[in-house]
């Protein structure tokens, strides 16, 4: 089955700097790669996703890149703000299979 | 408002006392699942259901049961809870049946402590 590795497990950045979180997956058949943000005391919430027919996707300060050959994808947050502090999860799946999540990255943005 | 509702939010119970955590979604989603979240282990899937009366084991199903009698509800049952089931539990739903690669909506979580 699918296995998703996520790094780093913790990340601290200064406000205004960029943050990058990386994930690798094992199953070349996976074709959907979402990123979720979990704020304290809440359930995870989708912030961006990418499908295997696309190499990059942006939404304001957030971008995700996908390298199918290397089987890795990354989340990029630019101009970080204190409200970006949260736990971020990557995940992978293919059609009709459950989402498999990475172990999460705790991002701290220091003002 | 589209949402997944779990109850209770917090629960402390004793070993062996059967309990049920309820989950309900109002989005007419076919696909529902339960996860547990533990420090350093991320989100691990317990059970999932692709439609009414269809359930499958996830990665960590031991000690849990589920049922899917109605599309909107997917309760998680612990017949004989043990301390190693102390965890934060999340229910999630997704649109499915041919559109399985879609956003998952999560509930607020249930923090369970078994003493």
Image: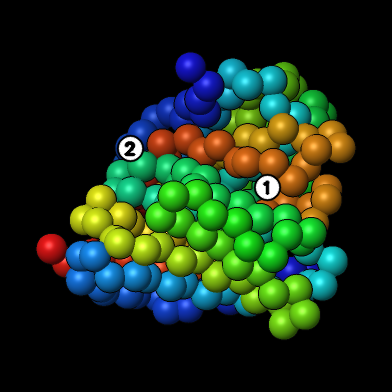
Q: Is residue B65 above or below residue A84?
A: above
Residue at (41% x, 68% y) in the render = A105
Residue B69 spot, x, y in % from top left? 74, 22
Quadrant of the rendered image containing residue B62? bottom right
B110 over A91 or under it: above or below: above
What's the image's color scheme?
rainbow
The residue positioned 50% from the left and 65% from the top of the image is: A75
Q: Which residue is mark 2?
A: B10
Question: How many C-alpha atoms fall within 10 Å of the one at disc 2: few (<14), some, or many (≥20)?
Answer: few
Q: Residue at x 67, y 36 (%)?
A: B94
> In the displayed image of the protein, which residue is found farthest to the bottom?
A70
Q: Quadrant of residue B74?
A: top right
Query: Can you give x and y, in whole percent of width and height, for residue A23 in the image?
Result: 57, 73
Res. B81 in view? no
User: Helix, strand, or loop for circle 2?
Assistant: strand
Considering the image in quadrants, where does the C terminus of chain A appear? bottom left
Q: Height in image: B91 above or below B23?
A: below
Q: Is residue B81 left or right of residue B70?
A: left
User: What is the quadrant of the N terminus of chain A in the image?
Assistant: bottom right
Q: Residue at x 45, y 56 (%)?
A: A62
Proximity of marks 2 and 1: CB atoms separated by less than 8 Å: no
Whether residue A60 is visible to the viewer of this picture, yes or no, is yes
| A28 on left or right of B13 | right
Q: Position of residue A109 (x, y in %)?
A: 23, 64
Q: Which one is earlier in the sequence, the residue at label 2 or at label 1?
A: 2
Q: Position of residue B4 (x, y in %)?
A: 52, 28
Q: Nearer the viewer, residue A9 or A35?
A: A35
- Secondary structure, mark 1, is strand
User: Residue B47 got which mark?
Assistant: 1
Chain ID of residue with mark 2? B
Distance between the alpha carbons at the discs numbered 2 and 1: 21 Å
Depth check, front residue: A104 or B5: A104
């Amino acid at each position: 089955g699918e296995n998703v590795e996520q790094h780093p497990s913790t990340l601290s950045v200064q406000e205004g700097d960029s943050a990058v979180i990386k994930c690798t997956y094992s199953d070349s058949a996976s074709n959907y790669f979402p990123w979720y943000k979990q704020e304290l005391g809440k359930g995870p919430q989708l912030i961006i996703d990418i499908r295997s027919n696309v190499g990059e996707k942006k939404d304001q300060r957030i971008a995700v890149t996908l390298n199918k050959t290397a089987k890795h994808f990354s989340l990029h947050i630019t101009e970080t703000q204190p409200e970006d502090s949260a736990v971020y999860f990557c995940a992978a799946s293919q059609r009709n299979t459950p989402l498999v999540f990475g172990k999460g990255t705790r991002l701290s943005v220091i003002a | 408002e589209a949402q997944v509702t779990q109850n209770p939010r917090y629960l402390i119970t004793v070993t062996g006392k059967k309990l049920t955590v309820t989950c309900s979604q109002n989005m007419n989603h076919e696909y529902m699942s339960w996860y547990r979240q533990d420090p350093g282990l991320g989100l691990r899937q317990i059970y999932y259901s692709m439609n009414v009366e269809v359930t499958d084991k996830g990665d960590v199903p031991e000690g849990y049961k589920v049922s899917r009698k109605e599309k909107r509800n997917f309760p998680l049952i612990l017949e004989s809870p043990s301390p190693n089931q102390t965890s934060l539990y999340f229910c999630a739903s997704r649109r499915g049946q041919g559109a399985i690669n879609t956003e998952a909506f999560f509930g607020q979580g249930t923090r369970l402590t078994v003493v």
